Image (spheres, rainbow, N blue to C red):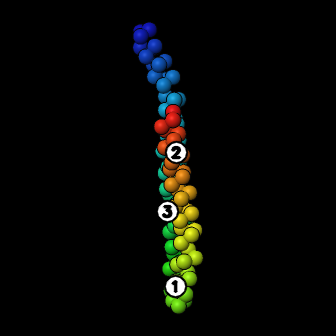
Amino acid sequence: MLEAAAQAGEAATRVPHLWHYAGAGLGMGLAVIGAGLGIGRLAAGMAEGIARQPSAAGQISGATNLPLFLLEGVAILALVFCLLIVLMR
């Protein structure tokens, strides 16, 4: 009886240490979802702008490349930070 209680106590103390894995997984998921939504909205706006004014396609696509790269860079940094949380623990 005492052994079962000791094992349950050990399991209860191990569980809080695993919360950083759940937090990192949630952070990675939110980063990917947010980046996907942002890139999708930006690409939709670019396609709509090109459809409205096809002669400015080069300027529109050139103007949207930098925000796309920055948004993807932020998503990659968020994933790296979440992986660092998991690996440094």
Q: Residues within 10 Å of mark 3 (few under 14, many from 20)?
A: some
The answer to whether marks 2 and 3 mark residues whose Cβ atoms lie closer than 8 Å is: no
Of label 2 and label 3, which has the lower sequence position? 3
Q: Quadrant of the N terminus?
A: top left
Q: Position of residue 24 (x, y in %)?
A: 51, 43
Q: Residues within 10 Å of mark 2 (few under 14, many from 20)?
A: many
Dot 2: element:
helix
Dot 3: element:
helix
Q: In front of the other: label 2 or label 3?
A: 2
The answer to whether marks 3 and 1 mark residues whose Cβ atoms lie closer than 8 Å is: no
The residue positioned farthest toward the top in the image shown:
2
Amino acid type of disc 3? Gly
Report the number of discs. Answer: 3
- State the residue at coordinates (56%, 82%): 59
The residue singled out by tag 1 in the image is: 57
Amino acid type of disc 1? Ala
**Do we see residue 42 in this rendering?**
no
Q: Which mark is residue 36?
A: 3
Q: Which mark is residue 82?
A: 2
**Do we see residue 2 in this rendering?**
yes
Dot 1: element:
helix
